[in-house]
Amino acid sequence: MSGLSDILIQLAVGVVPLGVAYLAFRSATDANKKTQQTALMQAERQAEIERSKVDAEAFLRAKTIYEDALSQMETHMGRLQSHSAQLSTDLTNEQSTSTAMRDHIRRLQAQIRALERTVIALRTQLVAAGLAPAPVSETTGPYAVGGRSDDTR
């Protein structure tokens, strides 16, 4: 039996290194997987950091463009408001000038009507006194005195 025991002892001594080798192999493969996963995660993190940098740069460019456009629009709006105020002032001036001219035209029309009445009264007095009134001539103008045409209104 001692031969069988020796074989079993030798077999046990031979299996133990194989078991240790197998455990070392499993540990190495697990460590390799962990290393690969860690490297992959680090690569993903690095890629995410790079994407964040690119996104941040794009954001800064877009912000700069937006702020420049906003500044230009504010400047343009200021100019438009200034032009609007000037146009409002011009319109007010034009309206007051128009009102003044209308008032002046009304006064002149009233004076013309008063003069026409005076001419008619003087002609009536001349005719009543037995005198003939002067005929319409260049001195009285191209229009007949006392007659109103639609062009003079």
Image (tube, grey):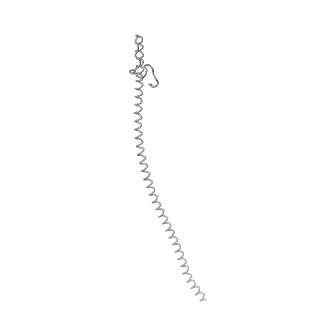
Q: Residue 52, image x and y in percent?
A: 46, 60
Check the image and report above or below for 71 versus 40: above
Q: How many marks?
A: 0
Figure quadrant of residue 144: top left
Which quadrant does the N terminus fall into?
Answer: bottom right
Question: In the picture, residue 82 is in which quadrant?
Answer: top left
Q: Which residue is nearer to you in this view: 17 or 136?
A: 136
Taking the view exactly as shown, the residue that stands out farthest to the left is 139
Q: Nearer the viewer, residue 105 or 40?
A: 105
Q: Position of residue 89 (x, y in %)?
A: 40, 36
Above or below: residue 114 compared with residue 18: above
| 58 vs 105: above or below | below
Residue 75 appears at what percent x and percent y? 40, 46
Quadrant (top left/top right/bottom left/bottom right) for the C terminus: top left
Image coordinates for residue 35, horizontal then vertical, percent? 50, 70
Of the pair 152 and 107, the residue shown nearer to us:
152
Position of residue 102 in the picture relative to residue 16 (left or right): left
Quadrant position of residue 59: bottom left
The answer to whether 86 is drawn above or below residue 7 in the figure is above
Q: Say which of 11 and 137 sits in front.
A: 137
